[in-house]
Image (tube, grey):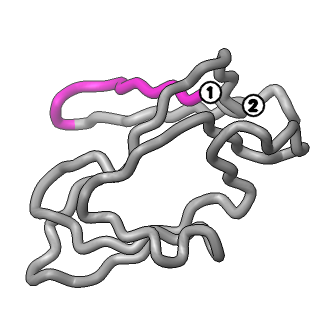
Amino acid sequence: MRSYLTGSPETRLALNDELSIGKGHGSIYGAVILDDCNFHESVRLDSFDVDKTLILIPPDGEFPVMNYPLIQEFKASFELESGAVGQTTDLKLLVYLSTPYV
């Protein structure tokens, strides 16, 4: 996360409602299951179990809110490609998004 907020505002970050952390959750269709994770020291997990919300007062600059290992192969649901065409005075940015589910 990059934070350039002035003062020390409390920030709430909502994660996927279907997120489960730890083993023993089984295979639930559509669920995001992480074996393990850890959070930045500024993150409070007061309401995480209830509504998957992280509460934090972000430090200035860039920092990792959450770290987690990927044990199994990850297959993204979309692919993003980008490029640029043209001269320095007339430049077009091209962004292509594709998915196998359409």
Of residue 102 and residue 37, the one placed in the foreground of this image is 37
Q: Is residue 83 magenta?
A: yes
Residue 10 to residue 36: above or below: below
Q: Is residue 44 left or right of residue 88?
A: right
Of label 1 and label 2, which has the lower sequence position?
Answer: 1
Say which residue label 1 marks.
79
Q: Is residue 38 magenta?
A: no
Say which residue label 2 marks.
99
Percent of width and height locating residue 18: 74, 56
Boundaries of the magenta span: 79-89
Of residue 71 and residue 89, the one placed in the foreground of this image is 71
Measure how far apart labels 1 and 2 are at the Cα level.
6 Å
Location of residue 78 (image quadrant): top right
Q: Is residue 12 left or right of residue 3?
A: right
Percent of width and height locating residue 10: 28, 82
| Residue for point 66% across, 18% down | 72
Residue 51 to residue 20: above or below: below
Label 1: how many Cα within 10 Å (few below 14, some 14–19, many 20+): few
| Residue for point 29% across, 34% down | 91
Under tag 2, what secondary structure?
A: loop
Of residue 76 and residue 100, the one placed in the foreground of this image is 76
Q: Is residue 79 left or right of residue 86?
A: right
The main secondary structure of the magenta stretch is strand
